[in-house]
Amino acid sequence: MNVSVENLSTLERRVSVSLPITQIETEVDERLKKLARTVKLHGFRPGKVPFKLVAQQYGPQVRQEVVGDTVQKSFGEAVRERNLRVAGMPKFEARDEAPSPQEFAYSATFEVYPELALGDLSQAKIERPVVEVTAADIERTIEILRQQRATYETTARAVEATDQVVIDFLGTIDAVPFAGGAGQDAEFVLGKKRLLPEFEAALLGMHAGESKTFTVQFPADYGGVEVAGKTASFEVTVKRVAAPKIPALDAEFARQMGVADGDLTRMRSEVEANVRREVDRRVKARIKDRVIDVLLQTTPVEVPKALIAEETERLKDMARRDMEARGMPVGNAPIPSEMFEAQAGRRVSLGLIFAEAVKKHGLHAKPAQVKAEIQALAESYERPEEVVKWYYGSSQRLSEVEAIVVESNVVEWVLGAALVTDTPLAFDTLMGSDAAVAASA
């Protein structure tokens, strides 16, 4: 087998291969002989079909299979011998200008993985958030949990900021109704940010049975393109006003929070544990985001176009499935690749950098690390030992945990090499309005 390699660009290669045509002919002959032992043709007993007829009937198909197998095998040998790391699918082409009539020739054009040199991290600056969780933070979280579990009782008073309302409404723009601008018996809890602030403000002070007309200015970046930036007129009738009734902080509330014996002290401890876990997760996520930025800034990568194309298609498929899960079927409608190419390039670059860091610095996941990660993941469940068994019962689930550990190892390596400054961060800034979500996880 003769092989030559041509550099078409920094990453693009063309491998030209030629090999004796007798190699293909011999393999075709052997496969046809094997096929002749079992093939069935009308008028002949199995295994008694003349070889000439077998060759006429099946020869072209067998030759095509042999050529395909030969190309794949010889190409694999060629790139291994020359240490070429193929990125994406090669483009194979038959070559008419074979060195001699006794040879079969083809070429394969493809990209290779780039050679990476990890950048200098010694001057990279990373702020590591430090968040103090106080007793007051836990009490505020419990209060939010109580508010989230409020029930609503009909009241004769006017609408207040945290009430539940049932309304009929009709919205128009230039006296023309618009999609999504009308509803009957629509139920909302004010203060949940489901309505535009101007709309909520207009409901305050209204009583059940009262109607009102008011205008609302839609933001320029509003999701509905038809109404974005426009002023709408709404006719609203309030049909019911219900005041929130916050559950008492008692044993029954503790049971609602999953504490079977209703012990409030135990409930507070569980809320605190959940909040601290969530704080730790969010702090790590912030650090990881900064580490990623630093790696991309210090290690420029020329990414193979084939890998970007593959990742773009994967992101498009994920987006399609996500939209369908949200009740937004897109069918066969095309999703523009341009929407995902930048993200795909970033993800592929990061993957290449991570892989090089893992290889160069031995950051592979160790069994003890995987075990510790699984135990940490299982802590928040009622039967953690069963969760541990569940992870170890599947190689795929175990691989997912190993990937998490590797990612953590890379982050720790970067933190050890960069200039890290601990920076205080307020609990409320980190958690925003999601504290209760973490506490009830």
Image: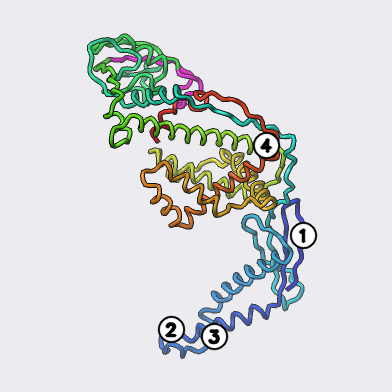
Horizontal and vertical percent position of residue 410: 63, 45
- Earlier in the chain: of badge 3 and badge 2, it is 3
Q: Nearer the viewer, mark 3 or mark 4?
A: 4
Q: Any magenta on residue 236?
A: yes
Looking at the rendered image, the quarter that the C terminus falls into is: top left
- What residue is shown with label 2? 40
Image: 312 above or below 287 = below
- Earlier in the chain: of badge 3 and badge 4, it is 3
Horizontal and vertical percent position of residue 281: 51, 36
Q: Residue at x 70, y 70 (%)?
A: 105
The type of residue carrying mark 3 is: Lys
Distance from disc 1 to disc 3, alpha carbons, whole Å, reads 39 Å
Quadrant of residue 194 within the rendered picture? top left
> Helix or strand or loop: what does disc 3 sit on?
helix
Image: 274 above or below 392 = above
Nearest the eye: 145 or 252? 252
The type of residue carrying mark 4 is: Val
- What residue is shown with label 3? 33
Q: Nearer the viewer, mark 3 or mark 2?
A: 3
- Earlier in the chain: of badge 1 and badge 3, it is 1
- What residue is shown with label 1? 6
Distance from disc 2 to disc 1, alpha carbons, whole Å, reads 47 Å
> Helix or strand or loop: what does disc 2 sit on?
loop
- What residue is shown with label 4? 294
Q: In the drawing, what numbered circle is on residue 178?
A: none
| Residue 186, visible in the rendered structure | no
Distance from disc 3 to disc 2, alpha carbons, whole Å, reads 13 Å
* Mark 1 surroundings: few (<14), some (14-19) or many (≥20) residues within 10 A: few
Horizontal and vertical percent position of residue 325: 40, 41
Nearest the eye: 211 or 28? 211
Q: Residue at x 64, y 47 (%)?
A: 354
State which region is magenta.
218-237
